[in-house]
Amino acid sequence: MTDYRPEDQASLPPIGFIAVQCFFYRPAGDAFNENTWAFPVIRELAEGSREDQLVTKVAYDDAFIDNFVAAGKKLAERGAVGILTSCGFLAMAQPLLAERLPIPVATSSLIQIPSILAWLPPSKKIGIITYNARELVSLHFERLGISKEHAARCHIAGAPDGGSLRLLVTSKGPYNFDDIEKEMIAAAKELMDEHPDIGAFVLECTQMPPFGESVQRVTGLPTYDVYTMGTWFYSGLCGQSDSIATNSANRELKTELIRADRRPPCGAPSRGGADRAEQNATLVGSGSRGRALDGRSRNG
């Protein structure tokens, strides 16, 4: 393995990450974990951002958007060059945040859909695997500027009700890599069985990148997620030579950490990466605000 050192990132400007009020383990590979990325990450919490408020087919109210704008402005003041978020359903907020924030913001992996469709043959479509298929609706696509014609070239499958991913995000179950991986693979296979015209996959949920390689391996199809979007987003903000300089080493580190965190103890949040998490713990904000944000994130 390449000798990757966190200090290699020291000269790179940070990406800002708007954290939400979800309480679960976030291993390497998850968008929230700083070990996922080849560049520095700083975080701010958006108040009033529970899972049931985020994952919805209904447009967000003004107070909800105001909380994300406040967090985004703090990130800009702290030197962030761009902003990512903790939930792909925040596609609903994309134009509102883009208009009100002083730096670029990319809210959802679904932003990649038009580009993917551009290189797919016209006869091919995209399979979207989402946290909740019932709540992902046409309005999310519209808010990202995705045309009705492009949206019609997407097939959607969701994580199962009562499954490990849904239980994890709602703090009703432990992190179980193997079970979530099975759910992801099953969703991909189901989509391919029902829609043989699928030519690529997009994973909506920010908890899904650790399983993207499994989906790609099983289906043999290109697979995109918030990691691929974030890497592309940052390279345009800061120049490819700097942002890619540590990417190969960081990718190896991410893969190794994902494998090490595969099997956390049953019935409790994982401690498989606890030493790494404690070593890499950071605090929200420029000073201590009492919210330790590490692999076992208190606010995701």
Image (cartoon, rainbow, N blue to C red):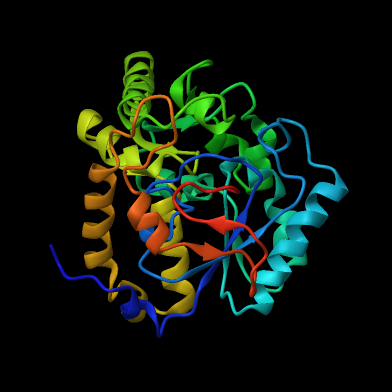
Left or right, residue 65 beside residue 41? right
Depicted 229 relative to depicted 133: above or below: below
Left or right, residue 126 beside residue 69? left
Left or right, residue 94 beside residue 96? left
Q: Which of 32 and 209 is in front in this view?
A: 32
Furthest residue toward left: 1
- How far across and down, in percent of the image, does residue 8 sit? 31, 79
Picture quadrant where residue 240 is located? bottom left
Depicted 8 relative to depicted 222: above or below: below
Picture quadrant where residue 215 is located? top left
- How far across and down, in percent of the image, does residue 18 sit? 62, 57
Q: Nearer the viewer, residue 199 or 54?
A: 54
Tell me how many marks there are: 0
Furthest residue toward right: 62
Quadrant where the N terminus is found in the figure: bottom left
- How far across and down, in percent of the image, does residue 254 sit? 28, 54
- How far across and down, in percent of the image, does residue 80 sit? 58, 74
Depicted 156 relative to depicted 33: above or below: above
Q: Residue at the spot x=70%, y=36% of the render?
A: 139
Furthest residue toward bottom: 11
Q: Residue at the spot x=39%, y=38% of the render?
A: 270
Q: Which of 262 and 212 is in front in this view?
A: 262
Q: Residue at the spot x=77%, y=63% of the render?
A: 70
